[in-house]
Every structure is written in structure tokens, then in C-alpha cells.
């Protein structure tokens, strides 16, 4: 067999038979079959060693294997297999361009990659070599050279079943086998061809002990094979013979008459296996769903435990608040009983609120509870502070309507106090606002306490403000308030203040009371603490 090539023609294979006749087989090439590398005079000047040619064919090029047994450490993220693979026969139909050869292994690129120096090498060569042979730069793989790989894939090679090993050295050298497959194929399509090649060695399906044979001879061998088994051997028939005895055996085989029943049984078994596989898949799916449901239940249990903890905490707080409210209600009942007792001992006889007090009218306008009231007698005005953060001014002489709404606080208005023509308001926003009663305008804002201002009272041109555990004394200077002193020693909210003559009385949530001031001593049996101090300080 002899193959010839031309620069612009398809490859032609000449097959010489034993009787001396010759046949010709032309291998069709498409426009994409030719190499895309351009040849230039520089190709002849390159110092690349020449590619060795086989002894038995001038057109077939033998290429050394690209694998080696080096175990050098890797210098990039690419890794090499620890065990060397057996090289595939690689015999080109025509000599490749020198530009498609690696300068390290002198063979056609195998898995070409571009390195940091810009040159292209085989991946294995680049990973095993320390420096570039061209510019002596350190080699590190950057990216695959897809363009070169595609050009190499368009090169024509001989089928592996048409090649044989020359010599016993390593790496192995291959040449064209005149008795093998005569076809030339593209390197990128070798697997498709070699998988269906008629020259591919196969084994007899009847008995592995039969000698190896080619795929194209398998059909003829099966007609002459002496190891043909009965088609019912899987059911227990032990017959083994050639084609003639095989046909005679089928006439007397006891399983031949039962083949339909046996086939139905096989079909049933197959259906059962398929159903069993489906059930296994369903079981696996249900198990996965069960696992997910278990995880979800665990998450819900944890969430429920957290909610129960929050609920217990809120219940404890509500219980404490309820107990405090009950104590307040009990104290109010005691005070009402005390007032009733005093009224019963007076000239009025039995206590009847309807006979003593009579409602003259109702002012409506706030959006929340009213916390404090204050009267300006010179103008017949009533000031009311509410939880809606506003102060309303009411006419108590003629119209009995709201004259104006004063806005400025960011919290509940808890206390109101009048000194001269100025209105002072204390709020839960911890501030005291000074208002001009003549024009009902805000004139100043004072950051008074660190906690809500609960009560206000004025006396001797001074303003007293009560908050948490503290009472502050302010000098009134025009529209300004100058802090004069802070009275401490209390351990709860100061809810009430009143100034009378030279004394200031404060009420808070303490259960006992004792206090002295100046030359006199005050002693009153109140449930709340009443501390006494002189305003003159």
C-alpha cells in the first residue's frame, strides 16, 4: 500500500493485492482540511530540529510521544497525572508546518498553551520546564491556545489501526502498516473513525478463547466458529457447537418450545426491575423530602422556643405592671376612704359629690389623655397639656372654645406652670419650653433633665422641676432659666411639687417619709415620700 499527496490535491492511497492488481482510494478533503498557517522563508531558517521520517514510507511522519516520566514540582495551578499514559500512535499523512511544533519536545503541539513570555508550548512541556528556550524567561501557563489547537485538529493522520510500532525503544516510534487501515482522517475526528473502523481488533462474542480478529472478519468467523452457544444458554442449555450443529440442536432443544413463555417471563422480570428502580427512586426522593421536613421542623421548634421565651418575658413584665397598678388602686382607695371619713366628720354630713360639684361644661379637642392643667386668671385662660404633644388654650369667660394650639414638644406634655406672663411646660422629651402668654408664642427651649420632666412649680421668681431621682432649681431671668442647684437623695420619680411660703414639698414613690428643713421639722404620715427643703437654698 502506498499513499501519495500533492500540495493542492486530495490524498490517494494505492492498495496492491496478492494477485498483483491495484486499487485506488481517494480521500475527499474539504476547504477546511488544509492548514491555516502561512509558510514563509523564515520557516527554513528556524533552528527547529527536523522531524524524523519513517523508514518504510516517505509521506508519513513519525512524531515522538509527548509524555515523559519527569516528576518535577509544578509551578502553576495546572497539574500533571502521576502515572504516564500509553502514547497513541500519531503518524501524519503529510509533514506539518514547523510553526505547529513545540520548541521543547520538537513534536507537534499536544494541548498547546500560551505562557507568560508569549510563546506557545505543550502543556506538559511548559509545566516541566523551568525557563523558555527562546528568551530564558520563567515559564508559567496563562491560557489555552485554542487557535493553534484547532489548526492541529485539521491535520490529516493515519488511523491507529493502520500503524505499527518500529523497534522497542521509548518513546515509541510508529510507521504506516501496509496491512492495516488505509484511511487518513483529521486528527480531531480520529475517535469517531477509530470507534467504527473495520480494522479494529475485536473478540469473538461466543468464546473469549477464540483468536483475535478484525471487525470486518467477525461476520465470517461467526459462521465458522466452533463455540456457538444455544440462545437459551442463560436458561441452562449447555450446547456449544458450530453453525451446522447449532441449527440441528434448535430442533431438539427443550427450551425452544418454551421460548415464548421464557421471553414473557424475561419481560415480566424486566418490568419488575424497572418498577423496582422507580420505587427506589421514589424512596430516595421521599427520604430527601423527609430530611428537608425534619430540618424545617427543627427550625420551627427553635423559632417557637424563642417566641415562648419572648412571651414569658412579656408576661412577667405585664404581671409586674399589673401588681404596680393594683398597688396604686389600693392607695387611691385608701385616700378616698380617708377623704370620705373627713367629709363625714364635717358639717356636710355624708359625702355626695353631685351635691358639692356640678359640671358646667366640657372642653373637647385633644387626641389623647389630658395630663395637666393650668389657669391664667388675668386673662381667663385655661391651658391643658395632653399626650398628643400639644398645649391647648381655652377661653373660660365668653366663647368657651379653643383659642390656639401650642406645638413644640416631641413627647407627652406632663406639667404646666405660670410665673408672671410666662407659661412653662415640661414634657417627656426632657425639655422645658417657655411661652409668652400675651401673644401665645414659644420664646425659649431648655434641655432640663436626662429624663422626662414630670412636674413644675414656681415661687419667689424661681422654677422647680421634678424628674427621676432629682429636683432642679432654676432662677427665672427674663425668658432664660439659669440652673441654681440640683436637689438629690431621692430614689424614684418625683411626681408632685408644691411651694408654700418658705418650703418646697415633693412627692414620689417611696414607702416611708421623713424630712427636716430650717428651724422647723415636718412629719406627715403619707404613703409617698414628702421631702421638705427651703427655696432660699
Image (cartoon, helix red, strand yellow):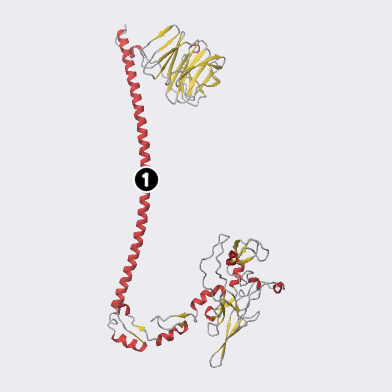
The extreme bottom residue here reads 19
400, above or below 6, in the image: above
Residue count near mark 1 (Cα–Cα under 10 Å), binned few <14, some 14–19, many ≥20: few
Query: Which quarter of the rendering shows the N terminus?
Result: bottom right
Instruction: Tell me which residue sits at (47%, 83%) in the image.
Output: 216
Residue 514 appears in which quarter of the rendering?
A: top left
Residue 374 shown left or right of residue 226 in the figure: right
Q: Which residue is mark 1?
A: 300
288, above or below 154, in the image: above
Residue 36 image offset from top left, x and y in percent: 64, 72
Most foreground residue, 396 or 451: 451
Most foreground residue, 329 or 299: 299
269, above or below 27, in the image: above
Residue 260 shown left or right of residue 215 in the figure: left
The number of discs equals 1
Residue 121 shown left or right of residue 395 in the figure: right
359, above or below 282, in the image: above
Residue 79 appears in which quarter of the rendering?
A: bottom right
Residue 390 image offset from top left, x and y in percent: 48, 24
Residue 515 image offset from top left, x and y in percent: 41, 12
Residue 384 visible, this orientation? no
Residue 230 visible, this orientation? yes
- Quick one: SS at disc 1? helix
Amino acid at each position: 500500500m502506498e499513499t501519495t499527496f500533492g500540495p493542492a490535491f486530495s490524498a490517494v492511497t494505492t492498495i496492491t493485492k496478492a494477485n498483483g492488481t491495484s486499487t485506488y482510494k481517494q480521500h475527499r478533503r474539504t476547504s477546511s482540511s488544509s492548514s491555516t498557517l502561512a509558510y514563509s522563508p523564515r520557516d527554513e531558517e528556524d533552528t527547529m530540529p527536523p522531524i524524523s521520517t519513517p523508514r518504510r514510507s516517505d509521506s508519513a511522519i513519525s512524531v515522538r510521544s509527548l509524555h515523559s516520566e519527569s516528576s518535577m514540582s509544578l509551578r502553576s495551578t495546572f497539574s500533571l497525572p502521576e502515572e504516564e499514559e500509553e502514547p497513541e500512535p500519531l503518524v501524519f499523512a503529510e509533514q506539518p508546518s514547523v510553526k505547529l511544533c513545540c520548541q521543547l519536545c520538537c513534536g507537534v503541539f499536544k494541548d498547546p498553551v500560551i505562557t507568560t513570555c508569549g510563546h506557545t508550548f505543550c502543556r506538559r512541556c511548559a509545566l516541566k520546564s523551568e525557563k523558555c528556550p527562546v528568551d530564558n524567561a520563567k515559564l508559567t501557563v496563562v491560557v489555552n491556545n485554542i487557535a493553534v489547537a484547532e489548526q492541529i485538529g485539521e491535520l490529516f493522520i493515519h488511523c491507529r489501526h493502520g500503524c505499527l510500532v518500529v523497534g522497542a525503544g521509548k518513546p515509541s516510534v510508529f510507521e504506516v502498516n501496509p496491512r492495516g487501515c488505509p484511511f487518513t482522517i483529521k486528527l480531531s475526528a480520529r475517535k469517531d473513525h477509530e470507534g467504527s473502523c473495520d480494522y479494529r481488533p475485536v473478540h469473538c462474542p461466543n468464546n473469549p478463547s477464540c483468536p483475535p480478529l478484525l471487525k470486518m472478519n467477525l461476520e465470517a468467523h461467526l459462521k465458522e466458529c466452533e463455540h456457538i452457544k444455544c440462545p437459551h444458554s442463560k436458561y441452562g442449555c449447555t450446547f456449544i457447537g458450530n453453525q451446522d450443529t447449532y441449527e440441528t440442536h434448535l430442533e431438539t432443544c427443550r427450551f425452544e418450545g418454551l421460548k415464548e413463555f421464557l421471553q414473557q417471563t424475561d419481560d415480566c422480570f424486566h418490568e419488575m426491575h424497572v418498577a423496582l428502580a422507580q420505587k427506589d427512586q421514589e424512596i430516595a426522593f421521599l427520604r430527601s423530602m423527609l430530611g428537608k421536613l425534619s430540618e424545617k421542623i427543627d427550625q420551627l421548634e427553635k423559632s417557637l422556643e424563642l417566641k415562648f421565651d419572648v412571651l414569658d418575658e412579656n408576661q412577667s413584665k405585664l404581671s409586674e405592671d399589673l401588681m404596680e397598678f393594683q398597688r396604686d388602686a389600693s392607695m387611691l382607695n385608701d385616700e378616698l376612704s380617708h377623704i370620705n371619713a373627713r367629709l363625714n366628720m364635717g358639717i356636710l354630713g355624708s359625702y355626695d359629690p353631685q351635691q358639692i360639684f356640678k359640671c358646667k361644661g366640657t372642653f373637647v379637642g385633644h387626641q389623647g389623655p389630658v395630663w395637666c392643667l393650668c389657669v391664667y386668671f388675668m386673662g381667663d385662660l385655661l391651658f391643658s397639656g395632653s399626650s398628643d404633644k400639644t398645649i391647648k388654650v381655652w377661653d373660660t369667660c365668653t366663647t368657651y372654645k379653643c383659642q390656639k394650639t401650642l406645638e413644640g414638644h416631641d413627647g407627652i406634655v406632663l406639667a404646666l406652670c405660670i410665673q408672671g406672663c410666662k407659661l412653662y411646660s415640661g414634657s417627656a422629651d426632657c425639655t422645658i419650653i417657655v411661652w409668652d402668654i400675651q401673644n401665645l408664642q414659644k420664646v425659649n427651649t431648655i434641655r432640663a433633665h436626662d429624663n422626662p420632666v414630670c412636674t413644675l412649680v414656681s415661687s419667689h421668681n424661681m422654677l422647680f422641676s421634678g424628674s427621676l431621682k432629682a429636683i432642679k432649681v432654676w432662677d427665672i431671668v427674663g425668658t432664660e432659666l439659669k440652673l441654681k442647684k440640683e436637689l438629690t437623695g431621692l430614689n424614684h420619680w418625683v411626681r408632685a411639687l408644691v411651694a408654700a411660703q418658705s418650703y418646697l414639698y415633693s412627692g414620689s414613690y417611696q414607702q416611708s417619709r421623713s424630712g427636716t428643713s430650717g428651724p422647723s421639722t415636718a412629719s406627715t404620715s403619707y404613703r409617698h415620700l414628702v421631702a421638705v427643703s427651703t427655696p432660699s437654698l
